[in-house]
Image (cartoon, grey):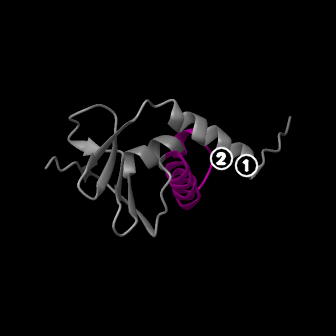
Amino acid sequence: MKYIITESQIDKAVFKYLDNQDFIQIKYGENIYIVNSEKDEYAQIGYNVRNGWCVISYDLLEEIVSFFPLSYGDMMSIITKWFENKFNVETSMIHVQPEIVVYYF
C-alpha cells in the first residue's frame, strides 16, 4: 500500500517530534542554546542573536534523519524552520557540527 505524504505533513511530524523532546532554552550573552537538561556541556542547537547563525548538532540531525526518510539538507531546513518558529528568530546561516559547546559565562 502506498501513502502520499505532503511536505507540510512531514514538517508537522518533525515539529511534533522536536516539541516532544522537552528541550531547555538557555540564554548566555548573545547566544541561545537548546539543551536536553540544565548544565549540559553540549547543546543540540546553538544560535547567535547578533549574526543569526544557527548550528545544529550532528547527533540531533542523525537521530531525526533515522526516523524520517529525508536528506540531511532537507532535514536541516525543517529543523531550522522549527527553531525559527519556536523561538521567534530569523537565521542567516545554518551549519552542522559534531559538538556545540555551551559556554556558561
- The three-letter amino acid code for the residue at tag 2 is Asp
* Kind of element beneath mark 1: helix
Residue marked by disc 1: 8
- Label 2 sits on a secondary structure element that is helix
Please say if 50 is above or below 21. Answer: below
* Residue positioned 16% across, 46% down in the render: 104
Which residue is at 59% across, 35% downward?
Answer: 16
What stretch of residues is rendered in magenta? 65-86
Q: Kindly identify the residue that appears in the image at 52 percent across and 45 percent down.
A: 86
Q: Is residue 95 left or right of residue 42?
A: right
In the image, taking residue 83 as reference, residue 38 lies left or right, namely: left
Residue 11: which numbered mark, if any? 2
| Residue drawn 18% across the image and 50% down it | 103
Compared to residue 77, the image places residue 66 above or below, namely: above
Asked if residue 25 is positioned above or below residue 45 in the image, the reply reads above
Q: Residues within 10 Å of mark 2 (few under 14, many from 20)?
A: some
Q: Name the mark on residue 87.
A: none
**Which residue is most to the left?**
105
Image position, residue 43 (x, y; %): 30, 45
Residue 48 among magenta residues: no
Along the line of sight, the residue nearer the viewer: 96 or 102: 102
Relative depth, front residue between 47 and 10: 47
Q: Position of residue 92 (x, y in %)?
A: 46, 70
